[in-house]
Image (tube, grey):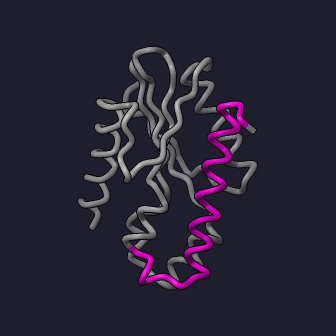
Amino acid sequence: MVRFVAFLLIFVALVSAQEPKKRHPLQYEEIIEGLDFEDVKLLLKTALDGRNMNVLGVVDVAKEKPRFSYMLVCNLSYAEKIFRELPQLGVMAPCRIYIYEREDGSVAVGFVNVETLLKVFGKQLSERAKEIFKKADREVKEAIKEVKGEL
């Protein structure tokens, strides 16, 4: 399962890098223009913290242009409620949000598409757990949109 999740993350990043206009159903992505890569990382961390989404770590994969990082993000109370129902989802936690610098200087920010996850795991989760997933999804998307200047 760990290999599968790692494969999915790498696949989503590669699809994003090669075809930025065509989204894959496994990803949600926003393009942020007019901000430096490091500014996007800092503003995103602040926006996530403001929504009680804990940034547990930032991994800088490529420090030279084009830069690529990902954040490990989790709301521990959400995680506990979901893991009580389906502990195997722990292999996908914490949520990974990728950030990469595009050739045109803009910055792409994305993460796994929660709607797709719910299609895969939905039958194994209660309505309460599905709502928690959806709430976390909204909070992360709001944080990204805040950095983008849309909130």
Q: Position of residue 4 (x, y in %)?
A: 25, 60
On screen, residue 150 above or below 79: above
Residue 116 among magenta residues: no
Relative to 65, 72 lies left or right: right
Residue 139 among magenta residues: yes
Looking at the picture, tell me which residue is in the foreground, 136 or 30: 30
Main SS, magenta residues: helix
The residue at the point 38 percent across, 31 percent down is 20
Q: Quadrant of the N terminus?
A: bottom left
On screen, residue 124 above or below 73: below
How many numbered marks appear? 0
Looking at the picture, tell me which residue is in the foreground, 72 or 130: 130
The residue at the point 61 percent across, 73 percent down is 131
Relative to 75, 1 lies left or right: left
The residue at the point 50 percent across, 50 percent down is 72
The image quarter containing residue 12 is top left
Q: Residue furthest front?
A: 22
Q: Position of residue 68 (x, y in %)?
A: 41, 30
The residue at the point 70 percent across, 40 percent down is 46
Looking at the picture, tell me which residue is in the foreground, 129 or 23: 23
On screen, residue 5 above or below 44: below
Magenta stretch?
121-150
Q: Quadrant of the C terminus?
A: top right
Q: Position of residue 33 (x, y in %)?
A: 58, 21
